[in-house]
Image: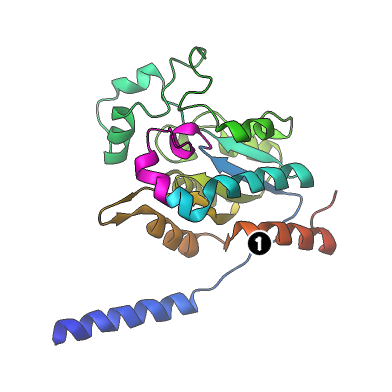
Amino acid sequence: MKTYLLISFFTLFSLAAQAQLPDPGFVIDNTTAIVITDPQNDFLSTEGVTWGLVGESVKANGTVDNLETLFKLAKENGIPLFISPHYYYEHDHNWKFEGALEAAMHGMGMFDRGDQLNKEGFEGSGADWLDQYKKYISQDYVTVSSPHKVFGPEQNDLSLQLRKQKIDKVILAGMSGNLCVESHLRELLEDGFEVAVVGDATASAILPGLDGNQAAQTNFRFVSSHVFKTSEVEGAIKKAKADGTLKE
């Protein structure tokens, strides 16, 4: 009985805390960019090496189409777009220790490339962009940062590229939710950016007893300024234009 009451108490407490959690909101303006992590085959293609882990979440969230919607909105509304990719070069396989997911990624050859200057075999590989995104990424308003190496952008030049374009606000999406997206969210916040996440333009691995997507969505709500649905982003852009915060 005591155990049951204790569980019930904490369940009620969690529900009450969530109900009282503020939503600071996010206003799109001319200092806003869209940042997408890892829009690559190994995560988003049915032939990708992680599809057996993330495919269920990708399909449930509509991630592939929702990311394409963000690409289109960036193009149609002149919003700067930044890509933070994940590549592993040959020398990265000489690392002497790894976390659990690092070991898994290296073991399955995820995002593998020869080296920084070698693109042999890159086209159509797991490290390449998903085909339907290529026409958006190869545009002059798109900045592709140097690759992140574990999960967050601490070791790449994403923040520098954002700052150099006078970006203060980030709409964040991509793969995978509880790893690279969440790590980018936390680091960008610590670096002084205002960040919103598009929750259904992400997805995560789901394993027995380990639901990465649920963990990600919970932490997005706790940490970011706002969690959008993809369908809400277009409305937020229209409102920003009507209010004059986003100017042509």
Instruction: From the top left corner, tell me how far across and down residue 59 is, in percent.
Output: 47, 50
Q: Is residue 46 left or right of residue 107?
A: right
Q: Which residues are magenta?
A: 39-56
- Image-based side of 24 in relation to 190, left or right: right
Identify which residue, 233 or 48, lies in the foreground. 48
The answer to whether residue 191 is visible is no
- Looking at the picture, tell me which residue is in the foreground, 110 or 78: 110
- In the image, residue 10 above or below residue 32: below
Label 1's element? helix
Type of amino acid at the residue the image marks with label 1:
Glu
Q: Position of residue 70 (x, y in %)?
A: 65, 47
Residue 81: x and y, percent?
67, 40
The residue positioned 72% from the left and 61% from the top of the image is: 235
Among the 4 quarters of the image, the one containing residue 143? top right
**Which part of the image, by quadrant, shows the N terminus?**
bottom left
Q: How many numbered discs, if any? A: 1
222 w.r.t. 115: above or below: below
Residue at 68% x, 28% y is 138
Is residue 9 visible in the rendered structure shown here?
yes
The quarter of the picture where residue 237 lies is bottom right
Q: Nearer the viewer, residue 166 or 206?
A: 206
- The residue pinned by badge 1 equals 232
39 up-or-down from 107: above or below: below
Crowding around mark 1 (Cα neighbors within 10 Å: few <14, some 14 to 19, many 20+) is few
Left or right of 167? Residue 195 is left
In the displayed structure image, the side of residue 76 where residue 83 appears, left or right = left
Residue nearest the viewer, comparing 40 with 8:
40
Q: Residue 127 placed where, x, y %?
A: 47, 27
